[in-house]
Amino acid sequence: MNKLRANIDQWLEGLDKNWEAMPIKRQHQVILYFFAAYVLLTAVVIFNVCRDTVYARNNIALEHIESPASAVGKSPTSLQDTLKPIKKK
């Protein structure tokens, strides 16, 4: 676990050094690209939610719950518990 944490810390430090070595103008471009991708992804998700809401069917089939005891054509042995009792010797 400590080795994994050390590897992650080393990787994050490398990313931080690369970010600081990048010119400010390039940093602004990268941030702008990430923000544009975030806005695009958000718009796609909102569009899909709205589309799914418009085309949703609100029909729910309501039926009575049938009791297994009142089922026709079943033998009483089929209604018993499927677990076998444990017998002590």
Image: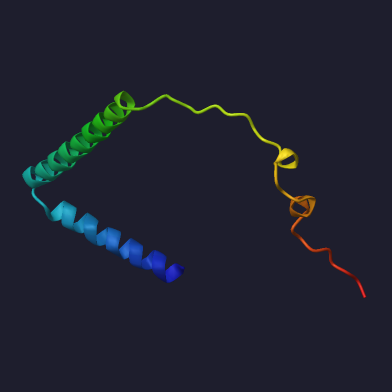
Q: How is the image coloured?
A: rainbow
Residue 31 sits in quarter: top left
Q: In this view of the protein, which residue sits in the foreground, 85 or 8? A: 85
Looking at this rendering, what residue extends furthest in the bottom direction?
A: 89
Looking at this rendering, what residue extends furthest in the front direction?
A: 73
Residue 40 appears left or right of 73: left
Looking at this rendering, what residue extends furthest in the right direction?
A: 89
Q: How far across and down, in percent of the image, does residue 58 sit?
A: 41, 24
Q: In this view of the protein, which residue sits in the foreground, 40 or 6? A: 40
Q: How far across and down, in percent of the image, does residue 41 sit?
A: 22, 38
Q: In this view of the protein, which residue sits in the foreground, 20 or 54? A: 54
Q: How far across and down, in percent of the image, does residue 65 sit?
A: 64, 33
Q: Residue at x 34, y 61 (%)?
A: 9
Q: Residue at x 46, y 68 (%)?
A: 1
Residue 57 appears left or right of 76: left
Count every numbered label the image shows and give the total. 0
Q: In this view of the protein, which residue sits in the foreground, 36 or 51? A: 51
User: Where's the C terminus, which quadrant?
Assistant: bottom right
Q: Is residue 64 above or below residue 82?
A: above
Residue 30 appears left or right of 46: left
Q: Is residue 37 above or below residue 20?
A: above
Q: How far across and down, in percent of the image, does residue 5 sit?
A: 40, 64
Q: Is residue 50 above or below residue 76?
A: above
Residue 27 sits in quarter: top left
Q: Residue at x 28, y 26 (%)?
A: 50
